[in-house]
Image: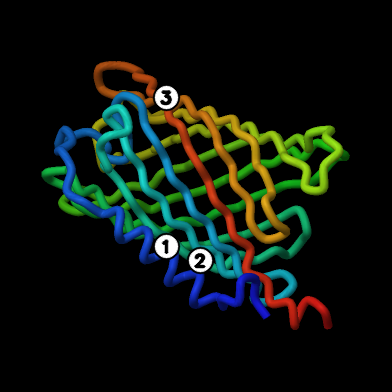
Amino acid sequence: MYPLGINQTGYFALALLGWCLLASPVRAQQPDQDPEIETRTGLWLDQGISADLARNRSVELEFHQRFDEGISNLFEYFGQGGIAFRPRSWFMVLPSYRYQRYPGDPATSYENRVIFNLTFAKPQGQWRPNLRFLTEGRFPENRVASARIRFRPGIDYVLPLRVKRIPVLVVTNEFFLVPGTNSFSSGGTYTQNRFQAGVRVPVTSFFAIRPYYMLQSANRTTGWETTQVLGFSLTLKAVDKSKSNK
């Protein structure tokens, strides 16, 4: 049995429907800048679904919608999926594919992306240091392909609260590097930096929410620019209880 009586396909369909409903025409971006970088205050909505295949493998699906221009303009949305492998409890390997849309960009309306994710995380009492190393192959419409490296160290801290489901403080800083040809104009090889802090609140044993605040810095040809982002992340763990009880 699955939580709420919905199987893995049902979770996928519901998330996909919500993602598509948010797709609407918006204002244009500058044609030569990376269309994934917002201007002014942003709002990010994230939805993640994890469904176990075996003890050390799972299907991982994500859907994201991003607004900028003072949270008034839907400039980007995407979905991605892959299969996560966990050869150790502290180590995950996740190859995945992403399809990304830029509805307001006049030259690049979509992008295909191939992603390879290595994540290391080992709890130390209430602390959980973690490191995500991610490589991306970017294939945007009407632009040269490029490769990007993303390096994100972080720390999770289980808050000392006497409640049934304890919230967790999550702090990360992500560095973006393009060592070769870049699909879009930039001020250098070090193209972006994202500092993020939030609190993950488990609502049930299989559902959690995480409001967060982020400072995103982009290295444009005119210099570094920083924007503020408010985000809300929803994660759903689809567990087959009939298998887990065996």
Residue 219: which quarter of the image? top left
Residue 227 to residue 240: above or below: above
Residue lying furthest top: 223
The reply to whether the C-beta atoms of the residues labelled 1 and 2 are less than 8 Å apart is yes
Residue lying furthest left: 106
Residue 68 x %, y %: 30, 33
Q: Which residue appears at 53% of the width and 46% of the height?
A: 233
Kindly report which numbered mark, 2 or 3, lies closer to the viewer in this rendering: 3
Residue 218 x %, y %: 36, 26
Q: Which residue appears at 24% of the width and 48% of the height?
A: 102
Question: Which quadrant of the figure contains the N terminus?
Answer: bottom right
Residue 82 - label = 2
Q: Amino acid at mark 1?
A: Tyr
Secondary element at image label 1: strand
- Earlier in the chain: of badge 1 and badge 2, it is 2
- Earlier in the chain: of badge 2 and badge 3, it is 2
Residue 66: which quarter of the image? top left
* Label 2: how many Cα within 10 Å (few below 14, some 14–19, many 20+): some
Q: CA distance from mark 1 to mark 3?
A: 27 Å
Q: Which residue is mark 3?
A: 228
Residue 16 to residue 53: above or below: above
* Label 1: how many Cα within 10 Å (few below 14, some 14–19, many 20+): some
In the image: residue 82, left or right of residue 157: left
Q: Amino acid at mark 2?
A: Gly
Q: Which residue appears at 35% of the width and 18% of the height?
A: 224
Secondary element at image label 3: strand
Q: Which residue appears at 55% of the width and 54% of the height?
A: 117
Q: Does residue 151 show up?
A: yes
Q: Which residue is mark 1?
A: 97
